[in-house]
Amino acid sequence: MTAPTAPARESPAAGPPPAVLEIRGLRVAFDVPAGRLPAVDGVDLTLRQGEILALVGESGSGKSALSMSLVGLNRGPRTHISGEVDFGGRNLAEASESELRSVRGKDIAVVFQDSLAALNPLHRVGAQVVEMMRAHRRMPRERAMDRAVELFGEVGIANPRDNARALPHQMSGGMRQRVMIAMGLANDPAVLIADEPTTALDVTIQAQVLSVLERARADHGTAILLITHDLGVVAEVADRVAVMYAGRIVEQGSRDEVLFDPQHPYTIGLLGSVPPIDGPVTDRLPAIPGNPLTGVDRPKGCAFAARCAFVRDACEEPPELLRRDGGPGHLDACVLPGSVREAARGAGRDPVPNERGRS
Ligand SMILES: Nc1ncnc2c1ncn2[C@@H]1O[C@H](COP(=O)(O)OP(=O)(O)OP(=O)(O)O)[C@@H](O)[C@H]1O
Ligand SMILES: [Mg+2]
């Protein structure tokens, strides 16, 4: 494993790196039997060149709906997408299918957890990476294959030249996942969207894959939106973190701000629900007491209010994502006074101590 590269930090002289993807007021709603489900409920988020932005939140909070909508992967008659996904002046939320096809895999690559569904079962994996490269640029087949084999080596596939000849079903899930990541990086994309890319991998391979992502960011300035349940992964590679709850971003800031100085009771609960280091290993975060909002009806005010031990009348108003008690880039959507958040942090990082039944 290579030494971790320095994260893309703001240098005071140069200012922050340029934005590559600016998401403004993004909404994604699905028609379901009960009505219209607001899976992504007005999200603003900026992804900057060369940064790794981690998007975290419980299952069902809308992380995948958000990431898929950025490149139109969940369009359909029952999906309603609105808002702006600004990529170099183009609004991808309104781009045609053919425009999106030329962006996907070249400028913006996506890696999802379900690698079996994403690969063509009938084609050898090396050939699929070659195809991905040649679909977007002129390149002799042999040179593309050499590059594919090199990428396979980089993502930790043993005997890369032999394994390039394998069919997807002949590989383990972890190997296929690494093929997907190699394919994602094949065209040196400006943006890589990785939805739980390492969840299925064992710890050693996971570290290898993360260092591949860090290298892509360092060598090519690739901006990475990394969706993960694993706060260990966040702590290791993320520059910034955005926390999603019920389709909204409730907190965002630098990794250290969010992990070590969380402001929103939901973030505090999420961090408190990390299993102890000597506890049972799970690939999902244990749930915060109470249930996430998954229905079609959403409160006008804070979506977390029903689960928050510190709820007040003020929580019935729609909370804005603002800088409150954190640093300049540290935003949260909790209207409670600082003293109350302090109490939330003090409650053993457990915003709902009573329901959890701890003594
Ligand atoms: N195609 C769809 N049709 C209807 N509802 C959907 C669809 N896709 C997602 N949803 C719903 O939208 C909400 C957000 O789902 P999403 O998959 O984005 O969550 P997630 O944060 O990625 O969860 P996980 O951590 O489990 O992957 C959920 O309530 C889910 O049931
Ligand atoms: Mg998901």
Image (tube, rainbow, N blue to C red):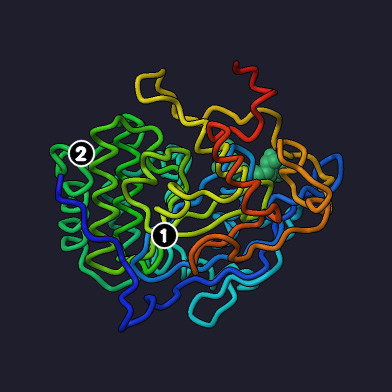
Report the image quarter containing ligand 1.
top right
- The amino acid marked with disc number 2 is Asn
Between 139 and 268, the residue placed more toward the observer is: 268
Between 189 and 255, the residue placed more toward the observer is: 255
Q: Residue 132: image x %, image y %?
A: 35, 59
Q: Residue 163 carries which label?
A: 2
Q: What element carries label 1?
A: strand
Quarter containing the C terminus: top right
Q: What element carries label 2?
A: helix
The answer to whether 227 is drawn above or below residue 204 in the figure is: below
Q: Residue 169: image x %, image y %?
A: 36, 31
Determine the CA span between mark 2 and mark 1. 22 Å
Which of the 4 quarters of the picture holds residue 178?
Answer: top left
Q: How many neighbours does mark 1 have within 10 angstroms: few (below 14), some (14-19), or many (20 or more)?
A: many
Q: Residue furthest front?
A: 339
Q: Which residue is drawn at 61% across and 47% down?
A: 341
Determine whether, in the image, residue 36 is placed left or right of residue 158.
right
Q: Which residue is drawn at 38% across and 64% down?
A: 223
Between 170 and 313, the residue placed more toward the observer is: 313
